[in-house]
Amino acid sequence: MKLSEGRKSVKAMNSFGTGKSAKSMLSSAWNDQRLEVIIGNLLRAGVLLSASVVVIGGIIYVARHGSAIVDYRNFQGKLSPLRTFTGIFHGTLQLSGRAIIQFGLLLLIATPVARVIFSAIGFVWERDYLYVAFTLAVLAVLCYSLFGGSLHG
């Protein structure tokens, strides 16, 4: 096939309603594939990081409290400082095993949120504004489900 015939086939392909030349379709596919690889690595790294933090917290907790005898007959409920973000961060800085475990779980919850944020940035970069709107709607639902309960008391 000659080069001029190749150009004609590209123009013919463009005229069949795709609205894009073959070159832009190829670069768009490369961008989509690259975005998927980056998001996959982001998810993998987030899960591995959170699992590592939870394991480290578990080791610290067992090292400090492993020999403690638990009395299941008398339950004494008390408010835990690990129910708030600030309590978890302060406990993590003090190397509390329970706080580090909670921090690892927060990292695990933050991983898909980071994926949605990164997807929105990728769609803006690709100028695919319909998917930007869908992704931001998903992000709004995620944020409401994570923080909505705490807003109502």
Image (cartoon, helix red, strand yellow):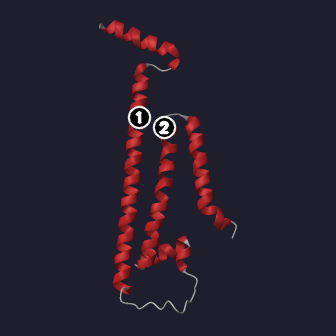
Q: Position of residue 54 (x, y in %)?
A: 39, 70
The residue that disc 2 covers is 125
Residue at 54%, 93% (x, y): give it.
74
Mark 1 or 2, nearer chain start: 1
On screen, residue 152 versus residue 17, left or right, reads: right
Residue, x 58% and y 55% (percent of image)? 142
Secondary element at tag 1:
helix
Q: Is residue 133 found left or right of 61 in the rendered image?
A: right
80 to 134, vertically: above or below: below
* Residue at the spot 49% in from the left edge and 34% down from the top edge: 126
Q: Which residue is mark 1?
A: 31
Q: Mark 2: few, some, or many residues within 10 Å (few <14, many ≥20)?
A: few
| Disc 1 residue crowd, few under 14, some 14–19, many 20+, Cα 10 Å | some
The nearer-to-camera label among 1 and 2 is 1
- Residue furthest to the left: 1
Q: Is residue 60 above or below residue 148?
A: below
Q: Amino acid at mark 2?
A: Trp
Is the N terminus in the top left, top right, bottom left or bottom right quadrant? top left
| Residue 80 picture quarter | bottom right
Looking at numbered disc 1 in the image, what kind of residue is underneath it? Asn
Q: What residue sits 58% from the left and 48% below the top?
A: 138
Q: What kind of element bears circle 2? A: helix
Residue 63's place in the image compared with 51, above or below, is: below
Q: Cβ–Cβ below 8 Å for labels 1 and 2?
A: yes
Q: Position of residue 151 (x, y in %)?
A: 67, 65
Quarter of the rendering occupied by the C terminus: bottom right
**How far apart, in angstroms, are the residues tagged by discs 1 and 2?**
10 Å
Task: Give how far across and how far down residue 106 sits, in percent.
Answer: 48, 65
